[in-house]
Image (cartoon, grey):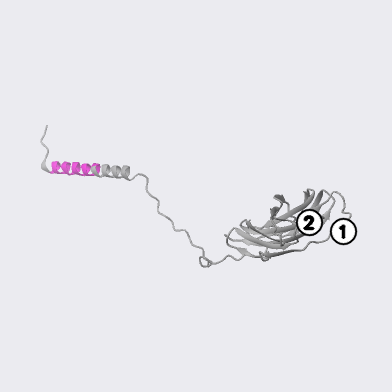
Amino acid sequence: MQPIKPNKLKVLLTGLILLAALAVNYACVQGAAQTLGTPTPIPVKTPQPTRSLPPEGSPVTKSPLPLSIDQPEEYSVVTNEVIVVSGKTFPNAIVVVNEQDVDVGSDGSWFLAVKLIPGRNLIIATAVDFDGNESVAARVVRYVQNAPTSEVVSLSLTLELPGENAIFKTPLAKIKGATSPDTIVDINEKPVDIFADGTFSLLLELNPGLNAIVVSAVDKKGNEAHIIRYVTYKP
């Protein structure tokens, strides 16, 4: 074998050094990749709305949602066990009558057949639209199996508290009123004790939103009186 010349030896050593450097660099890259794992994506900033928003804590203004009960008439006396309850609201509203869903027509009209029980019946209709506006309407109907033979005389009934369209920040509302002594009174179908002078009071638990408060009085002769108040509970 012939000896390698110095120049060729120098070139060969340089090439070996370059290969060794590349091998070390490749090993470092592989080790870093295993240490770091999957690269973390760069977060993308979400564009903010361009329209101006109301200041934080500003009250939300809601539009009144119309809701009416056209039939039956208030405090009516009926002899049919099943009656049709009908009314109107906005076409896009959701209506519930005595916890039953009701279809609303394109003109906002709605109706539902309701089965009554003998005596007094409370009919409550609620409506809410997709903007969160809501309304409540109520009717008191008396179902008698036989037509009354004597004239019904209205009782004296007054309601001092709450005021009409009152707004409560707590779930309890004080109901206070007066009627004739020896009269049976209930509030939202809950019996109420009457004092000797005919006054009565009760703490009634409210639901969030609109509430219908129905105060009814009836004496031993069947004479009766009713008052309906609408209040709002805003927690």
Would residue 171 appear left or right of 143 to someone viewing this image? left
Tell me whether the residue at label 2 lies in contact with that at label 1, contact meaning CB atoms closer than 8 angstroms: no
Asked if the magenta segment contains residue 40, the reply would be no
* Residue 33 in picture, x, y percent from top left: 32, 44
Q: Secondary structure at mark 2?
A: loop
The amino acid at mark 1 is Glu
Front tag of 2 and 1: 2
Where is 5 relative to 206, above or below? above
Mark 2 or mark 1, which has the lower sequence index?
A: 1
Range shown magenta: 7-23
Would residue 23 appear left or right of 198 to someone viewing this image? left
* Residue 56 in picture, x, y percent from top left: 50, 65
Report the residue marked by disc 2.
219
Mark 1 Cα-neighbour bin, 10 Å: few <14, some 14–19, many ≥20 = few
Where is 220 relative to 177, above or below? above
Mark 2 Cα-neighbour bin, 10 Å: few <14, some 14–19, many ≥20 = some
Q: Nearer the viewer, residue 154 or 181?
A: 181
Would residue 199 appear left or right of 78 to someone viewing this image? left
Q: Secondary structure at mark 1?
A: loop
Report the residue marked by disc 1.
151
The image quarter containing residue 184 is bottom right
Q: CA distance from mark 2 to mark 1?
A: 14 Å
Labels in figure, total: 2
Image quadrant where one finds the C terminus: bottom right
Image quadrant where one finds the N terminus: top left
Q: Nearer the viewer, residue 160 or 205?
A: 160
The image quarter containing residue 5 is top left
Q: Residue furthest right?
A: 149
Q: Residue furthest front?
A: 196
Label number found at residue 199: none
The amino acid at mark 2 is Asp
* Residue 71 in picture, x, y percent from top left: 80, 57
